Amino acid sequence: MIEEEVVRVESLVKRYGDGGEVGPISLTVRRGDVYGFVGPNGSGKTTTIRAMLGLLKPTSGRVEVFGMDPWRYSKRVNALLGYSPELPSFPSFLTARQVLEITGRLKGLGGSELRREVERVLDLTGLVNHADRRVGNFSKGMVQRLSIGQALIGDPELLVLDEPMLGVDPVGRVQIREILLEVRRGGTTILFSSHELYEVERLATRIGMVYLGRTVLEGGIDEILHHDGSVRVRAVTKAPPGEEVVESLRTMEGVKEVRTDGNSVTVVAADSVDVRAQVAERLVLSGCGLLELRTERPSLEEVFMDRVRSLGRG
Amino acid sequence: MGAVDVLVNYELRRVLAKKRILVLVAAVFLTEAGLYLVISRLPPSLLGPVSPYVWVLGVLAPTLGLLQVTSLMVGSTVFSDEYEAGTSDFWLTRPVSRTEYYIGKALGGLALILCIVSAYIAFSVGIAWFVFGPQNRLDLLLTSFPASVASALPFYAIGLAFSEVLRRGMMATILSGLTFFGSYIFESYANAVATFSNDRALLELTQFLPTWGSVRITTDVLVQGLSGSGLSPTGILALLTGLSGGSSTSLMLLNVIAYTAIALLVAWLRLRTGDVSRRAL
């Protein structure tokens, strides 16, 4: 069965008046995905998202959301999604409740249904006690939570969040992460951009990577994390391993790289070869004392940096 | 409640939350009060025949410049404030079409101008009645009210167009203000020169200026309305306002409509076809 595509971006290119250019960027978000859109600052994430919302007209390429061109049908597209921008900003003279009520009204809610929905979102975002305060007096973390809250009004089919953790303190991050996990449990399709790969790795089921304005990698999180066909064996020893044993690990069949850091040694090997027994044996025989040995998958950050390095070599 | 209603309501609240607009509105009322204070100092022999018509001066005074400046300031914040604050993203990522956004915002600003005009006219009639006794020919409010609104329209629309094209409130206010004062000054000089040199072509040229219809139309409507009052206060009006009747009201209306329509069209085309820029960091 073909999974339903909610967003399709094909070779999107956007040229700006100042000569800047982004693209070609491609991505596909399917119903139920939690899509992490990653890349460094200025790589084209926000441009892509703004094109998806009908705020920007692509110079070339194709953007479809729910099968519609958002530039032409922005009202219909925006009726189906909720959006939280990178730098959320609300009219400072409105209260949090008024912001949510306006959004609800525009999404067709009214009367008791609107009141219930506003209370639900205030509760979910932890803003119940601040509902009648002016947004202009909110902290950055509260504005970010309100931004996610207004995006959730009306139970959208797609939630688009541009850098939801940007500039938020650790407590705020935990709160936002919990909100997103709650939404994810409800089955809502989520697309969120971030350059903080640790957060993406914890939340996303699919990932698209952009670098220097173009898509460099896209796929399921497991697929991406095993993209380079490597496995990492990490050992912790009593004493730092000597140069001799490190060298002997490097010469083992299938080993691509050996990294040491104090009492820790990481062996990167082809995943077709199981090197764990040999690594353990050589470390024990070297006399540095083996305390722990485990297989690790590469972090998203490592995969991303590997990809960036390979592009640099290309 | 439709998107346009929500936006009109929001726009009224947004503009009323702006201090500089409130200061200008206060200036309109202070001008009215000052005007009546000055008139009350006229000798009774001069004041007597015109005192039942003094309300007219309060209706006219703001349309000679202050209303236009207030309107252009309201107009020049309509779209630019949203871009500068980053709240244009908020509106244009709701289920709101750009057409609805445009109509709602533009109508919201216009609603405020209607409120301002209604309030100062009521204030003017009230204070004139209270200080100078019963007022005559109040039926002329039926034409002078729409004429006052028409006075405000071109510069409201010009401010609105600059606000969308430039997306910077201060720049939009400066440029629409320059348009108003430039046109006003040019028209005054051109009128003076044309009178001295009997240059009809120069006089006709001034009819193409944006201030020509906007500043004259209310005076023209009232002068024509009062000319059948037997008292003929048109001379006093002309003296006090520096303007004279005689030009065609329909030409003035055409001037007002043309500038309003062109400016609104420019703003609409820019909003319809342009990308929504992000808030400046």
Image (spheres, rainbow, N blue to C red):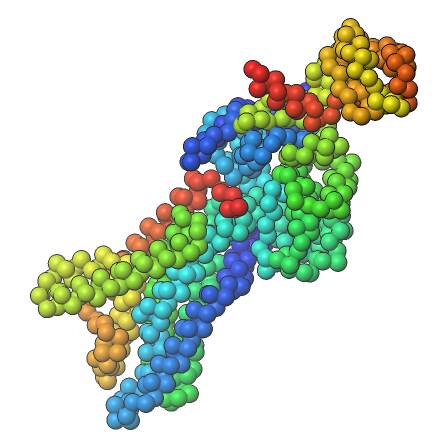
- State the residue lying farthest toward the top: A253
Camera-nearest residue between B255 and B206: B206
- State the residue lying farthest toward the left: B197
Q: Quadrant of the C terminus of chain A?
A: top right
- State the residue lying farthest toward the bottom: B44
Identified at 71% across, 55% down, the residue is A115
* Residue B267 image point, x, y percent: 40, 48
Counting labels gives 0
**B100, above or below A156, in the image:** below
Relative to A99, B159 lies left or right: left
Identified at 74% across, 22% down, the residue is A298
Relative to A7, A198 lies left or right: right
Camera-nearest residue between B105 and B274: B274
**A182, above or below A264, in the image:** below
* Residue B268 image point, x, y percent: 41, 46
Does residue B223 show up?
yes
Quarter-of-image position of residue B220: bottom left
Quarter-of-image position of residue A252: top right
* Residue A207 image point, x, y percent: 67, 26
Q: Quadrant of the N terminus of chain A?
A: top right
**A297, above or below B84, in the image:** above
Relative to B171, A38 lies left or right: right
Does residue B136 show up?
no
Relative to A53, A147 lies left or right: right
* Residue B199 image point, x, y percent: 10, 62
Identified at 64% across, 59% down, the residue is A137
Quarter-of-image position of residue A264: top right
Camera-nearest residue between A289 and B65: A289
